[in-house]
Image (spheres, helix red, strand yellow):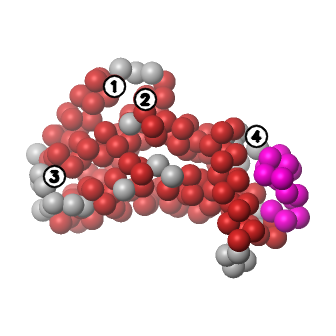
Amino acid sequence: MTDSPERARLLGLTTDLILREGVVDMSLSAIARGIGSNNRMVLYYFGSKQDLLDEASRAAFDRFPRLRDMFTRLAADGPLEDRLLEVWEDLSAPENHAFLRLFFQQFGTVMRDQDGWSAFTDRIAHEWIDATAEVLRREGFDALGARTAAMQLVGLWRGLQFLTLTGVDPEELRAANRATVQAVLTRR
């Protein structure tokens, strides 16, 4: 379905809905009711509940400037260590917690029922790792070393995001990030 004003409107309303209420046990009917539409129109514009929720979660991500732009800042000039540390500051910023909660809810939903979620799982398995590995390659890591280090960093950041939402002291999380970043950089 091509973009249309109605599709954009429904996407925006769905994005608002999932940021407000989450995605856990969100049925197609509940989404349609929540956005003032019906199942038929939602399916017409988005194809499936999974496609709608995946697209809405990407739209939600774009509403959080520190998240949306963090890999642009990582790829900018300046000391690599400082840029890697700043990624964590971007991820853990309190204004991003609504998106982090949504991400982990969606991840839990996908792990419970993986059918139809391949776009989401492909994106979370590759997007951040690829972006981080590219920066590391430009900064002197060989291809394999960059990929391995990127997986370690993204795995760390995902785990620290989870701990952020559970209330672990931000200074402890910052220290864990710094120690891992420094260890990774010694392998360059």
In this rendering, the answer to whether 2 lies above or below 33 is: below
Q: Residue at x 76, y 63 (%)?
A: 48
Residue 42: where, in percent of width, then height? Answer: 80, 62
Magenta residue span: 28-42
Secondary structure of residue under mark 4: loop
Residue carrying label 2: 164
Residue carrying label 3: 80
Measured Cα–Cα span from mark 3 to mark 1? 22 Å
Q: Quadrant of the C terminus?
A: bottom left
Residue carrying label 4: 25
Residue carrying label 1: 170
Ranked by sequence position, the earlier of labels 2 and 3 is 3
Amino acid type, mark 3: Leu
For the residues bearing labels 2 and 3, Cβ distance under 8 angstroms? no
Measured Cα–Cα span from mark 1 to mark 4? 30 Å
Ranked by sequence position, the earlier of labels 1 and 2 is 2
